[in-house]
Image (cartoon, rainbow, N blue to C red):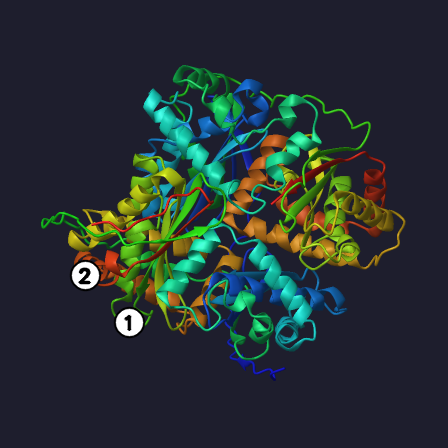
Amino acid sequence: MRSRPQPPGQALKHVLPCGLRLMTDVSSSGTGTLGVALFVGVGSRNEPLADSGLAHLLEHLTCRNDGVADASLLAAGGFHNAVTQPDYTAYYSLCGSEALPDVLARERRRFDPPQMGEDELARERAIVSGEIGDAVHGQVLGGFPWFWLAEAAFQVPEHAHNGYGDLTSLARVTPSSAVAFHREHYRPDNSLLVVCGDADAVAVERAAARAFDDLARFGSPTLLRTPREEPDLVEDRTSGTHDGAAEALRGTAVAWRAPLPTEGAVFLAHVVLADILASDTGGVLEELLPNALDVGAYLGLFGNPLEMSAPVPWIVDVVHRADLTHRQILAAARAALDLVATGRYDRNVVRQVAGRLSTQLWRTQDDVLGGLLANGALEFLHGLGGGLPSIAQDIVAVTPADCEQAARVLSQQHVAVLRRCG
Amino acid sequence: MMPPSVAYNETLAVLQAGSVPVVETSVKLRLPSPTVVPAAVFSALVRGAAREFFGRSDRLPTGALLGVFDDYGDVRVAVTVLEGDAGGLPDLLRSVLLQSVTGTWVDEARAEAARAEALARVDQDWAVEEAVLERLAVAGPWSGASGAATRPDGPVRLCHGVVAHIAVVTRDIGLVPVDDLHSVLGNMPDRAEAQNKRDARFARPGLDRLDVGEPTWASVGLGWRLPPRGDASYPAAHAAVHVLGGHVKSRLMRRLRDDLGWSYSPWAAVRSTPASAWCQVLARVPSRHVDEAVDVILREVLDLGHVGPRAGELEQALRHCLGAQRLAMASQAGLCAIVNHYQYLGQGTDGPARWARSLTAVTDAEVQAAAQTFLRPELVAGAIASGEAGPPVAPSG
């Protein structure tokens, strides 16, 4: 047994000479575990509309030939992966502390143009196709609702198109067009390096400075491109279909518009409100839909409101059978919001829900990978890096009145409804 | 209705304080059958019962967070609370679990709804895993989607004493010492290329085809029975499976993803209960490549038995296996789950360190012998799931 480890340190932020931002959130926890992530400011919202999925394909292409770092990671039991979001691509590793130099060297190589021939490009397209097959096709309601929701909820093309990958458009990508897209976006002044876990901050800063020392000096970091403003819906709209077999599972999702984390207490009230409607331990909406198989309410396409900039959807999704219609589900969701907005619910539940969310946020902070990605996204998108513990503390201060106000705001919005059939 | 009979073996393992103000607790419920659909039905019922309890209790600690996870032969219930409000946690857990096992919530209608939902969610991967387990005969009397899932009283009986078994409670409020694991990571033997290469020939077995999912993609599931965890050859068998498909540079990933581009994430893993163990392989491939993919997998398995691990291959697999365990224990929630699992297996709180020592001692020759003994192509149980237009897989050789 050892003494209680030091709590996570304050996140420290620097800019390397090449323009790459560096954030360290490390402490001597004794676990020997590090998380390393490189956030690059390119996501599905940046890609040409005719090349849907290009940012995701490039994520794959820049992960090829990671041999030395892979071996180092494997030897330490770690792994690496990458994710393409609407506003960024993140490459992340969980590793033993001893693997840090090799992992940093690999992240440095992300800025080199990917080397590939037509054959390699075709093979990586096939792997992307397999990934989409795994996640979406061949699974019951696979990809519901995130795969279709952006298209259903938004009108501005850069927000609405399918960024996971469209095989038709990907077939048009050539090695030279992929390299050109890489050159445009994979720049140190458009990126953030994050290191979390068991380490000494000064040693990490020195290692990072060495690893990225040979990059051209781009100067000050550029701010993320501001996404185009998404206009409010002027009427409710419905897309998708439930025209499947009678016994098939159906999915219905309803999307409102959520505030951003930078809006503080208002944002937190919307987070708590979602769990008041539906959570692992029940909710107001679940009581109104006793025949539903599964009811969810959350912020963000993937249930994480920290990982995208505006517009962020506030979502209710329901898995059900043919005995429920999308109109009934929409009516129930609006009725649930009305119950909260008018105070006709158990107001004591706010304290319990806020406490549970605080617990979950603390667990995320304690998990190296969870803290890495959450704090990295907070910093990259909102300049709030290292703020997860603050959110965990602040959320328990959300009051019933805050949630009721959030419900009133949502009640006044028009909504987008998505229908899917299993 | 049968009376409840809860086997309750509580072990409180209080570890050191952690770096975030939460307290973790895990409980395992053991099923007699490791098959997929009954486990999903059972966990749905436990989840529902626990939710019922959480929803109406007026004495929940602040921030009480509930999780229910099903993993083949067992279901884990985890409760997390904010530090300072954890005194009543063991009582809370007992109440939740007794509600799960004896509560009136679990009636025929609820069970039927859970069964129907589990069946409606059966996809290609589930279908082949279920089929493989059934063919391996590691399943109990409730095996198969056509067994427990179609038996009207099956899920209810699962929840009423016949099988529900509270195996262990682990309470943990901090980080486990990882020094023992560190000490075994740096002392690995060098390994030489095996010389006795032989032609890897085999007869491909006929595999059942399940009409599930869409036609262009297929899930290939293969399985082999392994010695139980207490057997002397278990570590070598575990290592062989990890070489085959346990990490991103394993044989299956190199061949099916990197070389051929057919599969995004093929894997092989060991599943174990206190009494049995088996190897499970799963790969999603384009339907037109099903025959070849099965051949690729079986050829790699056969090669492992004939030639053994290549130079550095076993060392890489073992380092990854042990390192992954270390990383998984770096958070309080992960640590609690792992210590809980080892206790469930009868290994005690020092189980992770003892497992690291036994795994590190495995040699190339032992892996080769384990592959020859347990992973022979003729012993495979397998199934292919794809939509109607998927091709049958015929025997060859």
In this rendering, the answer to whether B276 lies above or below A302 is below
Quarter occupied by the C terminus of chain A: top right
* SS assignment at label 1: loop
Q: Secondary structure at mark 2?
A: helix
Residue drawn at point x = 61 percent, y = 42 percent: A144
Q: Which residue is mark 2?
A: B369
In which image quadrant can residue A302 be found?
top right
Decide which of A347, A22 is in the foreground and name it. A347
**Amino acid type at image mark 2:** Ala
User: Distance of mark 2 from mark 1, alpha carbons?
Assistant: 14 Å
Disc 2 + disc 1, Cβ < 8 Å: no
Along the line of sight, which residue is nearer the eye, A190 or B73?
A: B73
**Residue visible at 66% across and 71% down?**
B108
x, y percent for residue B315: 25, 51
User: How many circles with numbers are drawn on the protein?
Assistant: 2
Q: Is residue B229 above or below residue A123?
A: below
Q: Judge from the rendering whether residue A285 lies leftward or rightward of residue A62; answer left or right.
A: right
Q: Position of residue A352 (x, y in %)?
A: 74, 59
Residue B65's spot in the image, x, y percent?
65, 60
Query: Which quadrant does the N terminus of chain A fall into?
Result: bottom left
Identify the residue at the far left of this view: B196
Neighbour tally class for label 2: few under 14, some 14-19, many 20 plus, Cα within 10 Å: many
Q: Chain of mark 1?
A: B
Taking the image as drawn, is residue A226 in sight? no
Same chain assignment for discs 2 and 1: yes
Amino acid type of the residue tagged 1 in the rendering: Asp
Residue under label 1: B231
Which of disc 1 and disc 2 is earlier in sequence?
A: 1
Query: Vertically, is B258 above or below A212?
Result: below
To which quarter of the image does residue B290 belong?
Answer: top left
Query: Badge 1, how many Cα within 10 Å: few under 14, some, many 20+?
Result: few
